[in-house]
């Protein structure tokens, strides 16, 4: 017995797994029954012969036959009858007299189909584009004929399955299955994609029946070379009224599926959604596969049973160019336009994302995320989807299709050059510009109010659902707790003695549990718009319309369209033409003062002035160091004396004696630098009269301010020359670090000056640069100002600062931070005998050969020998804080800038 029981389990599991195969076998038997005659009398004849052959055995049987044995025999005899499939409920169609639809009137409506649908062979073959990312996107098309009543059949057949090559290096997988077909019905205004929304139903090639998000396995799979028929029964007199069924090669593979209530009573249009297959269509009048009953096809339909969608064939197709400023509601206007005009197809990257979502593509950051509305990042992790190949292919194929478009490119529609490209591409279409600038009209305001209210309702419903789930979770937790306490109490009671139980029972009389009265729930309050929301003229979207970099790059070229550009018509929807142009001009002017120019490059004037300054600045630094050196100072004084003698000799003439020249040569005065007038007495900053340079007392902070003065002066003038726009003479102070890096190729950190913002820095050098009332950087000096002027300004500021500190004003002390120097790079060791390690193997330290480092000095570990050191010895950094360091003239800044940030 045990072995039999063990063997029975896998048999039962085998039966469960092979149930679909049994169904397929039964379908194949049905197909064979159609080819052979029915044999209902064969089993009956065998049953009649049985009593004659077994007459003797029946005489020997016991007359006391139990009722159970008779019942078993009856069940055995009835078993074949139960296995028989029920008879087909569909009956033969009756020939209808009356007007029928015209021959060839039934076809597929390409005006609302996806753009990868290719209709071939006179409308009987559906193909799809599969190049690039299009291989991952579903193709979908709807018939132009809707069924209102009666019973009609629509057939299709997969002719080929396609396996396009995929790109390499993708992080995500393609949606499965690669080849997919959905055959179903939809209303005229529903989504073109089957299984998207409540207004359609379908069977798919995997055997599922789909409505909205519900999928039920009700049929068998179908594939290549199989004729698939979709039967819609709207005949009220039929037992299968308001149902849809699926047939494969003329055999039913699904029971009649009831139409959802929201689809009953509406014209239903046969629809097909497919991917990577080529499909043959058959509207009739004759079916490709013989059905078990006579059924009329759509092409043989009565005119009263169907609704034909009329598509004008002679009308010129249109292209609409929506033109509006960023973040002013243009995308919402387009959505409203498409809702009213479903025959228009939007050409945009955001619609490609929507298409990919309906095709089942997984997106790494989800579909709610997008960097910008106009040019959202694809972000699928699939090479052919992320390389914008879909957009390029649609751009190429769109002008070849006879349909209406909305070219939704916000940035492109605002730039005349880009509009010209679009107009040329659609030269055979009727082009229309819809200008949406200024105060919106009442119709758009009502649309915005509806969108805002719908958004609030959606959030309220989500919050309500969240609270309900939380409440249910708490209720279940309380029930579990009560059950646990009851189980614990029962367990404790079971451990007590019988006597104790009786006593406890007498002592503890059951008490009725007090039921907590739950307060009656208030009726749900419907969300309403606040007064502030009612005043809104446009809705703020999750993402900006344009990326900041794109806006900064193109806004200067924004201009409204005119009929002279080639438009058939230009409509100013919200404001008149004059008002719209003024608003756009003000917008551009405002952006010029607030937007950065990403592609700005330094011009020739800047390069020349910057190189000249770098050389001059280094000469000044070198002269300060020379004046501090006693030997070089004597050389400078001697050279100055020689120049004075030479000039005196030139004044006296060549015949003058040496004594006369010496008498005429002025003596070098002993000048106190603090007593001279910087602007009146100093003609040369390299020599205030005694040979001493004006900048002799400059410290690190003074050199830094000198360099910053000239750099910001040069930057402001160079920006004006390079931009060459009268409306953009300068830039806002918030962009100072950006443009400083653009021109000087080094970072700018205002914190290094000991201040918190640019205004604090400008206060140090307000004699050179300032920030105006509009926060724009403004230079005080002309572009041809001599470089010596900046030295005089810096010296004047140093003296004023020193006087304030001498008077006890501690706020006058500068607290600049010196940039840290990069760590020195170690030079590679030369090949040769290895130096002894420390400590050596013998345990003794190597003897020092000399008191000074020489070639004989040993090397410890990996340290290079001191004789091989090529860099000069550098003094260690000062232990003084930056603010309290001794004031000396030395400066060890980098080349050209003095202060490297």
Image (tube, rainbow, N blue to C red):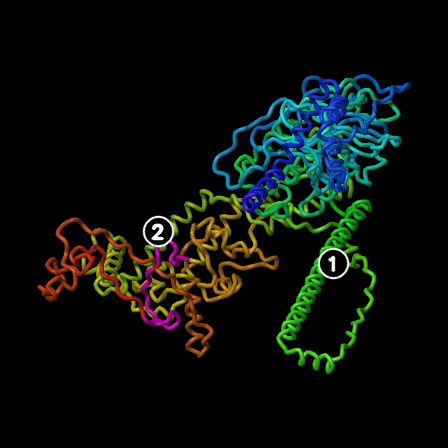
Residue 851 part of the magenta-drawn span: no
Quarter of the image for the C terminus: give it: bottom left
- Whether residue 358 appears in this view of the structure is yes
Q: Position of residue 628 (x, y in %)?
A: 27, 65
Q: Is residue 171 left or right of residue 573?
A: left
Instruction: Report the span colored magenta.
Output: 879-901
How crowded pointer 2 is (Cα within 10 Å; few <14, some 14-19, many 20+) is rated as few
Based on the displayed image, in which of its 4 quarters is residue 790 positioned? bottom left
In this figure, which residue is indicated by the disc labeled 2? 615
Q: Position of residue 436 (x, y in %)?
A: 74, 42
In this figure, which residue is indicated by the disc labeled 1? 464
Which residue is depicted at the point 53% across and 41% down?
172
The image shows residue 744, relative to residue 873, as above or below, that is: above
The secondary element bearing badge 1 is classed as: helix
Residue 894 part of the magenta-drawn span: yes
Quarter of the image for the N terminus: give it: top right
Q: Position of residue 785 (x, y in %)?
A: 45, 53
Which residue is depicted at the point 12% across and 57% down?
855
């Amino acid at each position: 017995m045990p072995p039999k029981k063990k063997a029975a389990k896998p048999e039962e599991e085998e039966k469960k797994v092979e149930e679909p195969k049994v169904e397929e076998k039964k379908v194949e038997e049905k197909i064979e029954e159609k080819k052979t005659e029915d044999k209902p009398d064969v089993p009956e004849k065998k049953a009649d012969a049985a009593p004659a052959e077994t007459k003797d055995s029946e005489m020997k049987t016991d007359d006391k036959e139990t009722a159970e044995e008779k019942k078993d025999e009856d069940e055995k005899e009835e078993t074949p009858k139960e296995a028989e499939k029920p008879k087909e409920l569909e009956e033969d169609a009756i020939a209808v007299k009356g007007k029928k639809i015209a021959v060839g009137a039934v076809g597929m409506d390409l005006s609302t189909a996806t753009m990868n649908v290719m209709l071939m062979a006179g409308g009987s073959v559906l193909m799809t584009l599969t190049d690039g990312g299009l291989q991952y996107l579903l193709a979908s098309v709807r018939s132009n004929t809707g069924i209102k009543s009666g019973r009609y059949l629509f057939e299709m057949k997969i002719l080929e399955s396609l396996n396009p090559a995929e790109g390499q290096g993708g992080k995500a997988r393609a949606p499965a299955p690669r080849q997919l077909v959905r055959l179903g019905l939809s209303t005229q205004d529903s989504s073109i994609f089957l299984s998207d929304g409540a207004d359609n139903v379908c069977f798919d090639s995997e055997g599922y029946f789909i409505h909205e998000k519900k999928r039920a396995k009700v049929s068998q799979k179908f594939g290549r070379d199989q004729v698939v028929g979709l039967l819609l029964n709207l005949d009220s007199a039929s037992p299968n009224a308001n149902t849809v069924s699926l047939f494969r090669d003329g055999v039913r593979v699904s029971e009649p599926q009831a139409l959802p209530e929201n689809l009953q009573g509406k014209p239903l249009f046969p629809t097909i959604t497919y991917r990577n297959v080529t499909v043959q269509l058959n509207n009739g009048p004759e079916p490709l596969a013989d059905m078990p009953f006579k059924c009329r096809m759509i092409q043989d339909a009565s005119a009263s049973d169907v609704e034909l969608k009329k598509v004008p064939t002679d009308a010129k197709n249109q292209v609409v160019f929506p033109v509006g400023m960023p973040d002013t509601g243009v995308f919402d206007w387009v959505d409203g336009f498409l809702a009213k005009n479903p025959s228009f197809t939007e050409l945009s990257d955001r619609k490609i994302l929507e298409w990919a979502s309906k095709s089942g593509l997984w997106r790494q950051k989800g579909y709610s995320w997008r960097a910008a509305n106009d040019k959202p990042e694809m972000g699928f992790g699939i090479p052919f989807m992320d390389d914008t190949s879909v957009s390029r292919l649609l751009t190429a194929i769109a002008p070849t299709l006879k349909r209406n478009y909305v070219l939704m490119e916000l940035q492109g529609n605002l730039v005349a050059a880009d509009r010209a490209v679009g107009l040329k591409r659609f030269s055979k279409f009727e082009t229309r510009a819809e200008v949406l600038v200024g105060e919106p009209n009442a119709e758009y305001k009502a649309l915005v109010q509806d969108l805002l209210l719908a958004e609030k309702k959606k959030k309220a419903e989500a919050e309500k659902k969240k609270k309900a789930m939380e409440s249910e979770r708490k209720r279940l937790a309380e029930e579990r707790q009560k059950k646990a306490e009851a189980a614990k109490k029962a367990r404790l009671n079971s451990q007590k003695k019988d006597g104790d139980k009786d006593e406890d029972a007498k002592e503890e009389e059951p008490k009725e549990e007090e039921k907590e009265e739950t307060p009656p729930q208030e009726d749900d309050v419907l969300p309403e718009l606040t007064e502030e929301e009612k005043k809104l003229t446009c809705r703020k979207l999750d993402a900006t319309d344009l990326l900041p970099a794109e806006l900064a790059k193109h806004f200067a070229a924004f201009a409204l369209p005119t009929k002279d550009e080639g438009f058939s018509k230009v409509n100013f929807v919200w404001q008149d033409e004059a008002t719209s142009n003024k608003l756009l001009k003000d917008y551009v002017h405002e952006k010029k003062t607030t937007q950065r120019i990403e592609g700005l490059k330094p011009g020739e004037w800047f390069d020349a002035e910057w190189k000249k300054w770098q050389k001059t600045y280094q000469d000044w630094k070198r002269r300060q160091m020379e004046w501090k050196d006693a030997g070089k100072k004597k050389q400078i004084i001697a050279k100055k004396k020689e120049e004075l003698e030479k000039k005196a000799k030139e004044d006296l003439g060549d015949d003058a004696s040496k004594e006369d020249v010496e008498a005429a040569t002025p003596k070098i005065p002993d000048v106190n630098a603090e007593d001279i007038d910087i602007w009146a007495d100093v003609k040369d900053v390299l020599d205030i009269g005694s040979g001493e340079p004006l900048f002799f007392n400059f410290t690190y902070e003074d050199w830094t301010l000198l360099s910053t003065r000239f750099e910001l002066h040069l930057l402001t003038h160079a920006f004006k020359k390079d931009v060459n726009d009268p409306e953009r003479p300068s830039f806002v102070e918030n962009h100072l670090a950006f443009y400083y890096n653009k021109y000087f190729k080094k970072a700018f950190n205002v914190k290094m000056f000991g201040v918190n913002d640019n205004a604090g820095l400008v206060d140090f050098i307000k004699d050179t640069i300032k920030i105006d009332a509009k926060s724009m950087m403004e230079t005080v000096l002309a572009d041809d100002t001599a470089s010596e002027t900046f030295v005089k300004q810096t010296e004047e500021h140093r003296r004023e600062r020193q006087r304030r500190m001498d008077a006890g004003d501690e706020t006058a002390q500068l607290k600049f931070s010196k940039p840290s120097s990069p760590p020195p790079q170690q030079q590679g060791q030369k090949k040769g005998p290895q130096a002894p390690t420390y400590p050596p193997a013998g345990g003794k330290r190597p003897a020092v050969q000399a008191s000074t480092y020489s070639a004989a000095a040993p090397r410890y570990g990996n340290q290079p020998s001191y004789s091989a050191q090529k860099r000069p010895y550098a003094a260690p950094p000062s232990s003084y804080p930056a603010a309290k360091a001794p004031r000396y003239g030395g400066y060890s800044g980098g080349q050209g800038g003095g202060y490297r940030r």
